[in-house]
Image: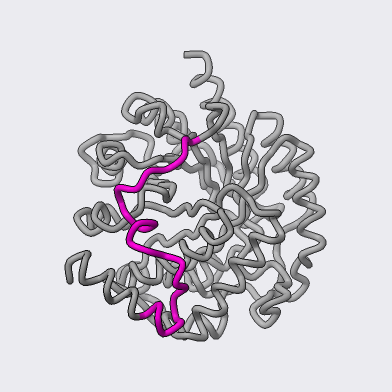
């Protein structure tokens, strides 16, 4: 691993070749740079992650493998949004990936994907419910099966152009949202060991590509947001290289948050280093007789733990996930997760 000064020289050289936009500088990437307050009003974010696409899990057979056709069912989508509004959720991240008929790259889109115009209609309905929609495109190599042939072109000029186009189009469709989430979780060999095709970027290449995604958002004045699990295994690199302007969502899905656990300790380490955080919990039990036995206390305990250990000025809010497709089969999971989140929010606001 080269030092930061050497890496910035390498990054500048790559930018000069036109592979990475020349809009990023050591100043904009500095892990010590200043950033704006989390919210002008101080209102906390209460966000849910809703899946339009589920092909971030396209390489994972146990999660159904690669989808080839648009999957979400409108009634489940509508009921989820209505439930979010009734439980005080004020933000929804929408995992777009290949479920939009992208004008720039229709070749990656699933059959019967929503058109940009259709998505805009849905975004307007969401905003009328008092919920702020935010786009998500997961570019982690473990979760990029949705990119189709481009998933086998990672870190090439053609790949950069496709990512640039998709980021710009997503930002345009969402009318320049405050944030965009780039995923970037679980890019390890272990997470891909059962894949037929494995891609794991490391060191300068991983950071260089990450900065590329960030720069494309920053050019549009949209703040980048990522999962934070890279810090679990590479804390020294992470704290040297990760810009303070990037929103961090560390995550832990167990019921009990032990501060000695690496995943939980990351909340404390991110706080000690001064990062803005949106801690993330989950409820993802498959509907069955043991439906509520998996982790019903996770989000409530996450809210309680993080509100005690993260400074209010850096605690932007919380996020609830439910790692299931937006289909009738999994509607009970989705609605239960939202209900648990609403309960956690009420308990937070009454203390």
Where residue 2 sits in the image (x, y, percent)? 17, 71
Q: Nearer the viewer, residue 5 or 290?
A: 5
Q: Residue at x 55, y 85 (%)?
A: 149
Quarter of the image where one finds residue 125: top right
The magenta-colored residue range is 14-38
Image position of 296 (left or right of 230): right
Q: Is residue 1 visible?
A: no
Quarter of the image where one finds residue 336: top right
Where residue 184 sits in the image (x, y, percent)? 42, 62
Residue 31 on the magenta segment: yes
Quadrant position of the N terminus in the picture: bottom left
Q: Residue at x 74, y 41 (%)?
A: 127
Question: Relative to 101, is 310 above or below?
Answer: above
In the picture as drawn, the residue positioned furthest to the top comes out as 351
Q: Is residue 246 visible?
A: yes
Image position of 188 (left or right of 197): left
Q: How is the image coloured?
A: one colour
Q: Residue at x 70, y 73 (%)?
A: 102
Residue 71 on the magenta segment: no
Question: Relative to 249, is 2 above or below?
Answer: below
Q: Main secondary structure of the magenta part?
A: loop
């Amino acid at each position: 691993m080269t030092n930061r000064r050497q890496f910035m020289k390498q990054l500048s050289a790559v930018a000069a070749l036109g592979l990475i936009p020349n809009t990023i500088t050591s100043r904009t990437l500095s892990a010590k740079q200043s950033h704006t307050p989390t919210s002008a009003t101080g209102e906390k974010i209460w966000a849910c992650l809703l899946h339009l696409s589920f092909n971030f899990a396209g390489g994972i057979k146990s999660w159904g493998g690669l989808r080839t056709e648009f999957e979400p069912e409108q009634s489940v989508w509508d009921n989820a949004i209505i439930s979010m509004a009734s439980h005080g959720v004020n933000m929804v991240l929408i995992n777009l990936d290949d479920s939009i008929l992208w004008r720039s790259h229709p070749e990656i889109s699933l059959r019967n994907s929503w058109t940009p115009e259709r998505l805009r209609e849905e975004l307007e309905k969401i905003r009328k419910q008092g919920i702020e929609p935010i786009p998500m495109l997961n570019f982690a190599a473990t979760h990029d099966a949705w990119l189709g042939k481009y998933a086998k072109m990672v870190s090439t000029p053609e790949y950069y152009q496709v990512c640039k186009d998709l980021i710009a189009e997503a930002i345009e469709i969402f009318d320049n949202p405050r944030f965009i989430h780039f995923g970037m979780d679980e890019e390890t060999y272990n997470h891909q060991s059962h894949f037929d095709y494995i891609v794991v970027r490391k060191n300068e290449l991983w950071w260089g590509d990450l900065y590329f995604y960030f720069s494309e958002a920053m050019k549009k004045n949209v703040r980048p947001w990522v999962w934070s699990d890279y810090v679990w295994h590479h804390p020294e690199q992470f704290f040297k290289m990760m810009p303070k302007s990037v929103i961090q969502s560390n995550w832990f899905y167990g019921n009990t948050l032990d501060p000695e656990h690496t995943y939980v300790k990351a909340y404390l380490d991110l706080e000690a280093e001064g990062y803005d955080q949106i801690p993330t919990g989950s409820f993802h039990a498959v509907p069955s007789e043991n439906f509520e036995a998996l982790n019903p206390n996770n989000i409530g305990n996450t809210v309680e733990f993080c509100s005690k250990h993260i400074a209010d000025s850096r605690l932007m809010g919380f996020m609830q996930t439910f790692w299931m497709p937006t289909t009738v089969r999994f509607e009970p999971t989705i609605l239960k997760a939202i209900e648990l989140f609403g309960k956690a929010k009420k308990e937070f606001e009454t203390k």
